[in-house]
C-alpha cells in the first residue's frame, strides 16, 4: 500500500508538470505513455495468440497515429483506414490465415494510441487545462470510492467472470463520489478561476464519465483474464503497468474532450 501511495503522489506531481508545461513536454509525456502502453498490450496478447503480433510493427503504427493526432486531428480517420489496410496487407503477405491477429492489432491501436492521443487536443481549447484535470478527478475519485465502499458494503458482484472483486455497491459509490467531486471541482473553478458552467453539467459528466471509466477498468480486466496475467507490467510500484493505472482513464479521456468541445468558450 505504501508503494502504491508514493507512486500515486509522484505520478500526480509529474502530471502537473507535464500538463502545465505543455508543448514539447506534453508530446514526450504522451508518447512515452503510448509506446509503453502499446508494448504492454502487445506482450500481453502474444501470450495467447499465434502467430504472435510483431511488436515493432505495432510501435511503428502507433507512432504514425500519435503524430497524426498531434499535427492534424482531422486526418485521423483517413490514417486509421490506411492503418487498417496496412495491417491486413501485412497479414496476407505473412501468409496468415484468419482475421484474429489483425483484428487484435487494430483494437490495440485504437485502445492505446488513439485514446492517449486525445490528450494533445486539449491544448487547442481555450480552457483546456481545466478540462484535463476533470479526467483525473473523475478517475481517481471513482477508483478510490469504489474500492473503499466495495470493501465496506459490497456483497453482490456484478461482473464476477471478469473481475470477481467488483461489486454493485462499489460501483454506485464510485459514481456518486465522481459526481460530487466533479461538482466541487466546478465550484472551485468558478470561485477562484472565473470558469463557470451549470452544476447539472458537472453532475451529468461525473456520472457518465465514471461509468465509462469503470467500463475501461473492466475492459482491461477482460484482456488480462483472457491472457491469464495479473498485471500488464511492473513499471509502477503498487500499480503494475501503464495500462493497469490508466485503464479507466483511457475511456474517460475522449468523453471529457467531447464535453470540452461542446462547452469550451461558454464558461
Image (cartoon, grey):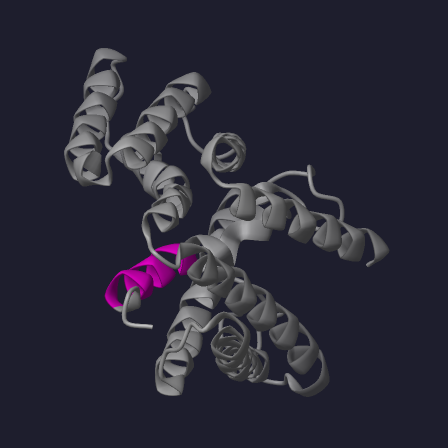
Do we see residue 147 in this rendering? yes
Image quadrant of residue 4? bottom right
Q: Residue at position x 21%, y 21% from top?
A: 86
Where 175 falls versus 63 (above or below)? below
- The one nearer the camera, 80 or 9, is 9
Q: Which residues are magenta?
A: 251-262
Query: Magenta segment: does it hold 260?
Result: yes
Left or right for 246, reference 127: right
Where 113 falls versus 16 (above or below)? above
The C terminus: image quadrant: bottom left
The N terminus: image quadrant: bottom right
- The one nearer the camera, 263 or 180, is 263
At which x and y percent is residue 94?
Answer: 27, 13
Where 193 falls versus 53 (above or below)? below
Query: Magenta segment: does it hold 90?
Result: no
Do we see residue 45 in this rendering? no
What residue occupies the far right of the structure in this picture? 2
Q: Residue at position x 34%, y 62% from top?
A: 255
At which x and y percent is residue 88?
Answer: 21, 24
Q: Residue at position x 37%, y 78% from top?
A: 197
At which x and y percent is residue 140?
Answer: 59, 65
Q: For the stretch drawn in magenta, what is the main secondary structure?
A: helix
Give the mark count. 0
Q: Residue at position x 85%, y 56% from top?
A: 2
Amino acid at each position: 500500500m505504501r508503494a502504491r501511495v508514493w507512486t500515486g503522489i509522484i505520478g500526480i506531481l509529474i502530471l502537473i508538470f507535464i500538463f502545465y508545461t505543455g508543448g514539447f513536454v506534453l508530446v514526450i509525456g504522451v508518447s512515452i505513455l503510448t509506446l509503453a502502453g502499446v508494448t504492454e498490450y502487445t506482450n500481453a496478447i502474444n501470450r495467447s495468440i499465434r502467430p504472435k503480433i510483431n511488436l515493432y510493427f505495432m510501435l511503428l503504427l502507433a507512432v504514425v497515429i500519435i503524430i497524426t493526432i498531434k499535427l492534424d486531428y482531422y486526418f485521423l480517420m483517413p490514417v486509421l483506414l490506411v492503418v487498417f489496410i496496412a495491417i491486413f496487407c501485412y497479414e496476407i503477405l505473412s501468409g496468415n490465415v484468419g482475421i484474429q491477429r489483425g483484428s487484435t492489432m487494430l483494437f490495440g491501436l485504437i485502445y492505446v494510441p488513439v485514446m492517449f492521443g486525445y490528450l494533445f487536443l486539449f491544448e487547442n481549447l481555450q480552457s483546456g487545462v481545466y478540462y484535463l484535470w476533470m479526467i483525473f478527478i473523475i478517475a481517481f475519485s471513482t477508483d478510490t470510492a469504489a474500492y473503499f465502499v466495495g470493501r465496506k458494503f459490497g456483497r453482490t458482484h456484478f461482473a464476477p467472470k471478469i473481475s470477481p472483486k467488483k461489486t454493485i455497491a462499489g460501483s454506485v459509490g464510485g459514481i456518486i463520489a465522481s459526481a460530487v467531486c466533479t461538482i466541487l471541482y466546478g465550484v472551485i473553478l468558478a470561485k477562484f478561476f472565473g470558469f463557470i458552467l451549470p452544476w447539472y453539467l458537472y453532475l451529468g459528466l461525473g456520472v457518465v464519465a465514471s461509468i465509462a471509466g469503470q467500463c475501461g477498468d473492466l475492459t482491461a480486466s477482460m484482456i488480462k483474464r483472457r491472457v491469464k496475467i495479473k498485471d500488464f507490467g511492473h513499471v509502477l510500484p503498487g500499480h503494475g503497468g501503464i495500462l493497469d493505472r490508466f485503464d479507466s482513464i483511457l475511456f474517460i479521456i475522449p468523453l471529457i474532450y467531447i464535453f470540452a468541445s461542446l462547452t469550451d468558450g461558454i464558461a
